[in-house]
Image (cartoon, rainbow, N blue to C red):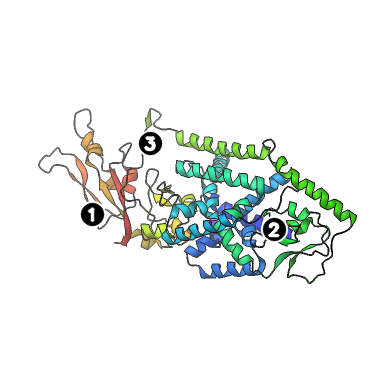
Amino acid sequence: MLKKIRKTLAVLAFVAVTLLFLDFTGTLHHWLGWTAKVQLVPAVLALNVVVIVALALITLIFGRIYCSVICPLGVMQDVISWLHSRRKKNRFTYSKEMRWLRYPVLLIFIVAMIAGIGSLMAILEPYSTFGMIATNLLQPVYQWCNNGLAAIAGHYNSYAFYSTEVWVKSAAALATSIALLLVIGYLAWRGGRTYCNTVCPVGTFLGLLSRFSLLKVHIDESKCIKCGMCTRNCKASCVDFKNGTIDHSRCVTCGNCIDKCHKDAIYYGRPRKAQKFPSTTEEGNQVAMSTTAHDENVASQAAQSIDKGKRAFLIGSGIAIATTAMAQAKKKVDGGLATIEQKQMPERKTPITPPGSISARNMARHCVACQLCVAECPNQVLRPSADMLTFMQPIMSYERGYCRPECNRCSQVCPAGAIKPISLEVKSSTKIGKAVWTHFLCIPTKDKDEEGNPISCGNCARHCPTGAITMAPLNENDENSPMVPLAIDDSKCIGCGACEHVCPARPVAAIHVEGLEDHRTI
């Protein structure tokens, strides 16, 4: 019963978190947004005391059920391990705790959190890792399926679905996500919860608490016949049937050992006072001998030919790379006659952080790089950073859209407090950057029509939502001087990027936004 309850809750939580990342419409956030806020590290960074205390109490009472039920990366590893166990049963062995690795990683992670080193947090934090995999690998597949349904519905004059553009938000993010999936997937395929109990800092921290949990998995040695079935089915490798001990700092309370024990020798709860009986029966000796022989053959059996499951991971990752590359390589044409050159991100001296992030420092210190805001952005403005200090944290660029004043979705979905919730009124008056005009890139200054006159433009001024851009003659003494955005009112510009987005100059816009280290209200 314990295993069935755990699996049911885990499936529901995993599906909910995954759908939260896959949904690009924002409709599911109203129902499932809480699943991101109950993750441990985002709750700590957001100073969500209620969630922190609740998770600590749950661990002190029930053990590490957070890792088996709430953590999406942990459930993903269980799914991968379960796929392998369908072909190869009773495949796990007991291993000692790797303290030399677990606790240094936890210490490094804590230092990174205090120092605001986002790159380390992004790689080590489990919720962030799953978010990267879901956003960069699973969401494109979800969007392609949606686009297929939209095409079918459109054929029958139905608008139940609408098509969305699939594009590579960051090559570095895509490569990192694939690498993390392959490494964690391989460890889960071979050893179950190896990553959770050797690398994951959240698992290590909760393991310190679960040592003192009220309810634990125990072995009743008066009933145990030393068959070893508990050890062979423990994906955390924490059950030592030979010595009758369980490492509760690594036990994730999955219930596998209880389910496989046919002698009722393993139970979950408070320890029982039972008399120990030596295992001297012939049946017990024979089972122990067969168990020893089995353990000696585990290593050789695990190193055999490549399984289909490993090939499935490689094929799935290859499909993600190929399809996202196809989406990136798709060309746009003007009237079917000429190819429109894609815009490139300008070199900004200061990156732009979303409205509500307060400052670049606040973003670096609180963001776990889960990329939920990137997945939810309807304007295709947010993308993962490739900078080493803020690796995978969201930055803004306006090649595919601009930050519309009527949208504040990123501030609504952030679970870690890196982007504070702000109203539309506050957002429209929050200055996140300033527009900068580049003279030699502007079309009126470099292009002429057939008669030799400067080509007029003015897109930036016409589309500026705050009226911060005014067109003026480049040379006041020349009546034929082209009109350019010579005057930009810094007191009105909020850095939304509308000017940069609509600028027709290619490959780099003639007017771009430079970010501000500290946001301010105008």
Q: Callout 1: helix, strand or loop?
A: loop
Which residue, given by chain and number where applicable, does mark 3 sit on?
A: 342
Q: Callout 3: helix, strand or loop?
A: loop
From the viewer's side, name the closer residue of 202 and 9.
202
- The N terminus, quarter of image: bottom right
What is the distance, in whole Å, between disc 1 and disc 2 at their CAs? 61 Å
Q: Nearer the viewer, mark 3 or mark 2?
A: 2
What amino acid is found at the position of numbered circle 3 in the picture? Gln
Q: Which residue is rendered at x = 60% and y = 55% of the image?
A: 98
Which residue, given by chain and number where applicable, does mark 2 sit on?
A: 254
Q: Going from the N terminus, do you reach mark 3 or mark 2 first? A: 2
Image x and y of residue 31, in percent: 56, 60
- Do residues under tags 3 and 1 come within 8 Å of each other at their CB atoms? no
Image x and y of residue 122, in percent: 48, 52
Which residue, given by chain and number where applicable, does mark 1 sit on?
A: 489
Q: Which residue is rendered at x = 27% and y = 53% of the image?
A: 467
